[in-house]
Image (cartoon, helix red, strand yellow):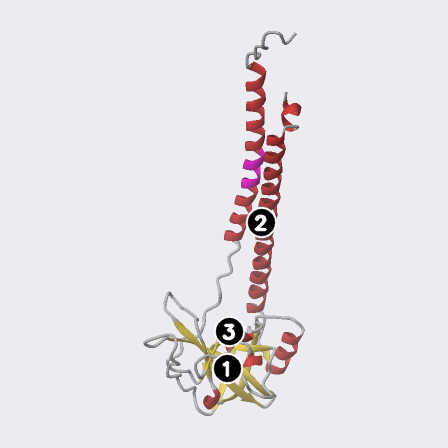
Amino acid sequence: MILPLLRTRRWIGFTAVVIIAILAFGLLSAWQWSRAEDRRAERTTLESALGEQPVAWPEAARLIREGADWIPVVVTGTYLSEAQLVVRKRPLNSRNGFWVLTPLTTDAGELWVNRGWIAAGADALSTPAIPIPPDGEVRVTGLMRTAPPADPERNTGLPAGQVADPDPRVLARAGAFTDGYLQLTSSTPDQQDVIPLGLPEIDDGRNISYAVQWALFALVAISGWYYFLRREAAEEATAPPVDQPLGSR
């Protein structure tokens, strides 16, 4: 009785819906699994980088241009405090705030340094008073990061001294390194009133959990389809025959 049911219009439609749902659940599961693999690769890259010895700034710049990320680096130079900016909407520990970006001029060129986090003032629209970096020559230790592409629409019409993305290409410094920035971990002399950013917690567990959940939803869809098909086929098999009207023979 199963095959005749599958030929009915109702079951053809229901089966089509179930197939579409299974395909959607499968694609979502594969996407989450891919995200988990990307996070796992990023965590491996970070852990490997932290085990490396810091390199000089020109070598770090070369590696960034070749597509590397999280490169330990030590660089000596002088901050240009008059040109520093803040990156808006950068919360820390559930508090709204900003990243402080300050250009550093060195013998090998100029680069942007993400000196860390400061809290927002009365509102997130006003540019806060940016702490002045140490005077004179500083020795900065940190990690070179690949610059994320900035969205031009997000970086127009902002208050003076603010940007939406830490992308040197929108920071208006001719001659500065544009492929990445240095995320400070420590400096000599120490800076004041700026909290250095911690390393990100890269966890792929949530994505793996979501991938498994979507796969389970696909199995539930298959099981539900088969259950209802078998139940209806059994009901039709045990149903009493319909009496034929008189004169039908």
> What residue type is disc 3 on?
Arg
Which one is closest to the eye, mark 2 or mark 1?
Answer: 2
The verdict on residue 174 being magenta is no
> What residue type is disc 2 on?
Leu
Q: Quadrant of the C terminus?
A: top right
> What residue type is disc 1 on?
Val
Report the magenta residues as a range: 216-222
Q: Mark number for residue 169?
A: none
Q: Mark number for residue 28?
A: 2
Kindly indicate whether the residue at mark 3 contacts the one at mark 1 (C-beta within 8 angstroms): no
Q: Please rate how many residues cluster around mark 2, counting C-alpha atoms within 10 Å: few if below 14, some from 14 to 19, many from 20.
A: some
Q: Please rate how many residues cluster around mark 3, counting C-alpha atoms within 10 Å: few if below 14, some from 14 to 19, many from 20.
A: few
> How far from the left and from the top, in percent, is residue 243?
57, 10
The verdict on residue 217 being magenta is yes
Which residue was labeled with disc 3? 154
Q: Quadrant of residue 160?
A: bottom left
Q: CA distance from mark 2 to mark 1?
A: 43 Å
Q: Quadrant of residue 64?
A: bottom right
